[in-house]
Image (cartoon, rainbow, N blue to C red):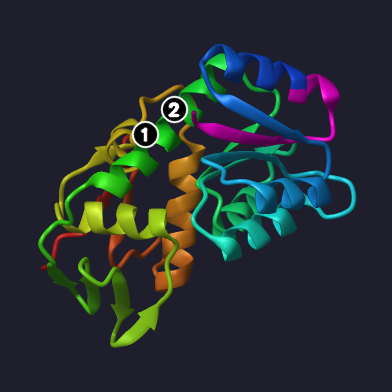
Amino acid sequence: MTRILIVDDEPNIRHTVGYNLRREGYEVVEAADGEAALAAAAAQPLDLVVLDLMLPGVDGLEVCRRLRARGPVPILMLTARADEVDRVVGLELGADDYLVKPFSMRELLARVKAILRRAELNRVARPEPPTRLVRDGLTIDTGRRRVAVDDREVALKPREFDLLAFLARQPGQVFTRAQLLEHVWGYDYLGDSRTVDVHVRSLRTKLGDRADTPRWIETVWGVGYRFREAG
């Protein structure tokens, strides 16, 4: 049975989320703070962690960092703050996705299912033949999952790499945020496209790409994003 750890210091949220996850057939473990979460993760294998950002003691960002250092367990981060800085830091530390409180239970369940589905696909999917994409000084090695800018290697998180590689394979084609969520994240659009925007901004920062004079990733205002065609 798929085991999910819920980490939140608010009992009502833990119980409500836990109740709904159990109804979907998941095994649920609950923790009220960061120390308890780390102990639970060390005591048993987990398939997903639903992690609140604001925790007493060891906060959610530190828990995320420590969990990611131990292994690739998927992490869905919850935050009561909509600050982009928090979202970027959480994703930088390895969270797979985030939800801003208050959220609908339908959306949380959809995100949980999508993250688990993608994790399963990554485990069983046959690897694609290695390819090496070179685009105006940007080199993307899909076999080794490495990226370099002008021969300088750039460290990307897994989802950042997936997003960049997806766009680079189809230069000039415009993708809406909903399409990127579907193709890169693996779930249907539910009205919150900020996940895509946060990842694009993080990619631009790491690559040294400017939004106003893009070298690679262009914003198509009112539509979405595309990878810039050479020329």
**Above or below 206: residue 212:** above
- Name the residue rendered at 36%, 30% in the picture: 187
Identify the residue position indicated by label 2 in the image: 113
- Name the residue rendered at 30%, 58% in the picture: 164
Q: Position of residue 82 (x, y in %)?
A: 68, 39
Cα gap from disc 2 to disc 1, whole angstroms: 6 Å
Identify the residue position indicated by label 1 in the image: 117
Residue farthest along the right direction in this orientation: 57
Query: Which SS class for mark 2?
Result: helix
Q: Position of residue 188 (x, y in %)?
A: 36, 25
**Above or below 131: residue 103:** above
Q: Check contact, mark 2 vs mark 1: CB within 8 A.
A: yes
- Name the residue rendered at 31%, 80% in the picture: 149
Q: Along the line of sight, which residue is nearer the eye, 171 or 62?
A: 62
Give the amino acid at mark 1. Arg
Q: Along the line of sight, which residue is nearer the eye, 194 or 184?
A: 184
In this rendering, position of residue 107 left or right of residue 60: left
Give the amino acid at mark 2. Lys
Q: Position of residue 88 (x, y in %)?
A: 59, 54
Any part of residue 221 in sight: no
In this rendering, position of residue 91 left or right of residue 199: right
Classify residue 98 by image quadrant.
top right
Q: Position of residue 213 (x, y in %)?
A: 36, 65
> Which range of residues does the magenta coloring cover?
1-14
Q: Along the line of sight, which residue is nearer the eye, 39 or 228?
A: 39
